[in-house]
Amino acid sequence: MRKALEGVRVLDMTHVQSGPSATQILAWLGADVVKLEATTGDITRKQLRDLPDVDSLYFTMLNSNKRSITLNMKSDKGKQLFVDLVKKFDILAENFGPGAVDRMGFPWEKLQEINPKLIYASIKGFGDGPYKFYKAYEVVAQAMGGSMSTTGFPDGPPLATGAQIGDSGTGMHAVAGILAALYQREHTGQGQRVTVAMQHAVLNLCRVKLRDQQRLAHGPLNEYPNKEFGDEVPRSANASGGGQPGWAIKCAPGGPNDYIYVIVQPVGWAPITQLIGRPELANDPDWATPEVRLGKLDKMFQLIEDWSADHDKWEVLAKLNEHNIPCGPILSTKEIIEDESLADNEIVVKVDHPERGEFTTVGMPIKLSDSPAEVRRSPLLGEHNQEIYGNELGLSESDMAELKASGVI
Ligand code: CAO
């Protein structure tokens, strides 16, 4: 079956997480993604290793379905080869520190000259302005995009979230930009520059917190559990802060992930009162409407917890869902990796690797009926030098040997 992006070629200079997460999606959609690495390789090949001398899970889980070539972009010969490569690709993607590709000798204007159809995608920490030349990592973006100040308990410090919204979150935004640029190229015949700043992507994901920042001007945020409000959106623990109240309530037997997140929609209240053994509260004027419950959400969730604490989270999930009450047990990473339905959905998948053997990774979260993704292993460093430099660019075996000996590839 033909894949959605079959025929699209990506020269992938990305490293670490944000960029590789984007190009991995393109590869799953069927693009030919060729990862161009320094001769020492993407740093994550060696980071957080669980097995000696084997590409790390960090690398293998972010670079599946790609090919790998090595190229020293600081050598003259390397720069020449890069020019030949750029002519053959549709997309160039990178997420180096600010200015790195310019310093290699390839500012956007030059890349456009080499290949006017090229789409050049860059991820940086920040947009134009005072932070433009600053490097950034995941939690830096969470800090400056509105996530950390709004995550945590009101009386505790700002917290980072485990979801990699700064890195992979930005990568997904980059995918949207790249696909839009590809589509526009169909009409214009021209490539374009796609840039995404991690701070901007996190802010996009924290959009509702800026909603609340402006609502504050008109009074307290009643949907928040906080008792006092200043002039900025406070951390509100596990409150959804949205139109329907929610909270993480305890379940049996009381372990660190024995919780379930429950949302009480207006229609959910009556069945909840039945379930928790307090049917009289369904029509009690002190409890019957969302408006009267709003001022005592903590008490409302305590009532539910008094019931849930005697049942395990799976039982609570089943019982609440019998009444269409939105809820979700807190799943540990162990529970997730062992979850049969996630495996059946091919979102948790097993992949074989020549050095590490079989390992588990997260599959393609976007399902296309006519372009199913098949997760294949990540490439070894420089595994495809022969295919690209030899077969495609026509370098001879002796040329290749010389380039290798002189540290160009
Ligand atoms: N050949 C030769 N040199 C190469 C090369 C190649 N193929 N590929 C990269 N390099 C060189 C670059 O030219 C650059 O050298 P100079 O600084 O001398 O010009 C250097 O390697 C890469 O620099 P860097 O700033 O990207 O790397 P770093 O480890 O110092 O910083 C990071 C890492 C992530 C902070 C930085 O890349 C960054 O801010 N990226 C943008 C934001 C981002 O994506 N962050 C997400 C990180 S994922 O958690």
Image (cartoon, grey):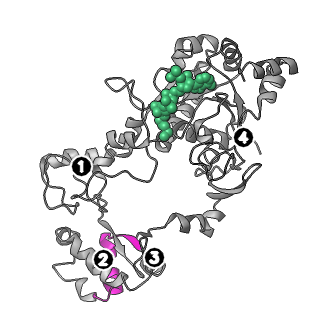
Q: How crowded is mark 2: few (under 14 residues within 10 Å), some or many (20 or more)?
A: many
- What amino acid is found at the position of numbered circle 1 in the picture? Asp
Per the rendering, the mark at residue 379 is: 4
Q: How far apart are marks 2 and 1 (CA)?
A: 26 Å
Work out which residue is located at the far front of the displayed protein and give it: 52
N-terminal label among 2 and 1:
1
Whether label 1 lies within 8 Å of ligand 1 gets the answer no
Does dot 1 land on a helix, a strand or a loop? helix
Measuring from the top left, give residue 5's x and y in whole percent: 67, 37
Residue at which label 1 appears = 212
Q: How far apart are marks 4 and 3 (CA)?
A: 41 Å
Q: Is residue 404 above or below residue 347?
A: above
N-terminal label among 1 and 4:
1
N-terminal label among 2 and 4:
2
Does dot 2 land on a helix, a strand or a loop? helix
Q: How crowded is mark 4: few (under 14 residues within 10 Å), some or many (20 or more)?
A: many
Q: How far apart are marks 2 and 3 (CA)?
A: 16 Å
Magenta-drawn stretch contains 320: no
Using the image as rendered, state which of residue 293 and residue 43 is in the foreground: 43
Q: In this view, does 342 lie to the left or right of 250?
A: right
Q: Can residue 122 be seen in this view?
A: no
Q: Is residue 240 above or below residue 41?
A: below
- What amino acid is found at the position of numbered circle 3 in the picture? Leu
Measuring from the top left, give residue 384's x and y in whole percent: 77, 32
Mark 2 touching mark 4, by CB under 8 A? no
Q: In this view, does 48 lie above or below 15?
A: below
Per the rendering, the mark at residue 280 is: none
Per the rendering, the mark at residue 317 is: 3
N-terminal label among 4 and 3:
3
Residue at which label 2 appears = 269
Q: Is residue 158 above or below residue 97?
A: below
